[in-house]
Every structure is written in structure tokens, then in C-alpha cells.
Amino acid sequence: MLCGMKSKKTVQLMMVIIGVISLCYGVIGIQSAPEDAHDYATLLGMFAGFGSGLIAVAIFLFIRSKVVSPEKLKQKEIEENDERNIAVKRAAMAVSWMVSVGLFTVLAFALMAMGLRVPSYLCIGALYVQFFSFLIAHRVYDKKM
């Protein structure tokens, strides 16, 4: 499989865990936020919304896996493991990687031009993390082939 996780239940469990952590962080943060920090409260509300959305999607996927017939699930699994579909996913991920590299580069230059050095450094750091993760993934896949 493309992402390396064999079990859909593992992905759903991770979604629930990340969702609960994000939801709790947002709710607790909103309760302890100062009254005049509206932008901070908005960000914490986004965390809470993201967490509750992840939980809802995981619950929906769990219910769907119990309701859908086993034949349909088997057919979907065969489609996901088809070599052509895997190649299409990898090509799409490669394109999205290139777009994100371009976006981080443009953001780093734009933020530096506006005099915002710390956000620019964050974009440059994200580029380095992305580049090194690409090199590690390339080396791992190259050894498997």
C-alpha cells in the first residue's frame, strides 16, 4: 500500500486519537484564553472544529465498514491494490509535492520581503523537512525495488 499502513482500523484509530487531542486542546485553550485575544480564540476554535471533524469522519468510516456488504469491500480493496491505481496515486502525490515546494518557496520569499523573518524561517524549515523526508522515502523505496 502507498502509505505503508496495512490496516484501515489503524488509520481510523489514529484519526480518532488525533481528533480527540485536537478537540481537547481547542476546548481547553478557549476556556483559558484571555477575553481580548479574539484571534487566538479563533485559532483554538479551528483546532476544536478540526478535531471534531476527524472524529466524525472516523465514526462514519467505521459505521460504513459495518453496513457495506463484504463483497463490495473486497472489490474496493482489489481496486485500491491495483498497480495502475497505485501508480496514479504516486504520480498525484509527486505533483502535490512539487506544488508544495513551490508554495513554501514563494511564501518564504514573500514573507522575507514583508519583513517577517520568523514565519519565513518556518517556511524554509518546512522545506528542509520536506526535502529530507523525500530523500529518506526515496532511499527506502529504492531498496525495496
Image: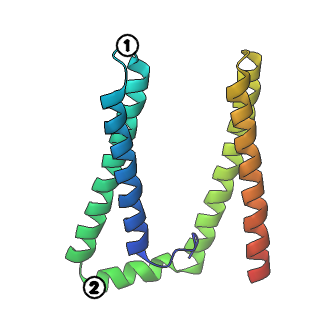
Position of the N terminus, as image quadrant, is bottom right
The percent coordinates of residue 30 (x first, y second) are 33, 30
The percent coordinates of residue 131 (x first, y second) are 77, 52
Label 2 neighbour load within 10 Å: few <14, some 14-19, many 20+: few
**Front position in the image: 105 or 31:** 31
Mark 1 or mark 2: which is in front? 1
The quadrant holding residue 14 is bottom left
Q: Residue placed at 66% from the left, 62% from the top?
A: 91
In-image side of 106 versus 7 (left or right): right
The residue that mark 1 highlights is: 36
Q: Amino acid at mark 1?
A: Asp
Label 1 neighbour load within 10 Å: few <14, some 14-19, many 20+: few
Position of the C terminus, as image quadrant, is bottom right
The quadrant holding residue 66 is bottom left
Q: Secondary structure at mark 2?
A: helix
**Front position in the image: 122 or 59:** 122
In-image side of 133 versus 21 (left or right): right
| Residue 74 higher or lower than 130, as above or below | below
| Residue 14 higher or lower than 118, as above or below | below
**Front position in the image: 73 or 8:** 8
Q: Amino acid at mark 2?
A: Pro
The quadrant holding residue 85 is bottom right
The residue that mark 2 highlights is: 70
Q: Residue placed at 30% from the left, 30% from the top?
A: 31
| Residue 128 higher or lower than 88, as above or below | above
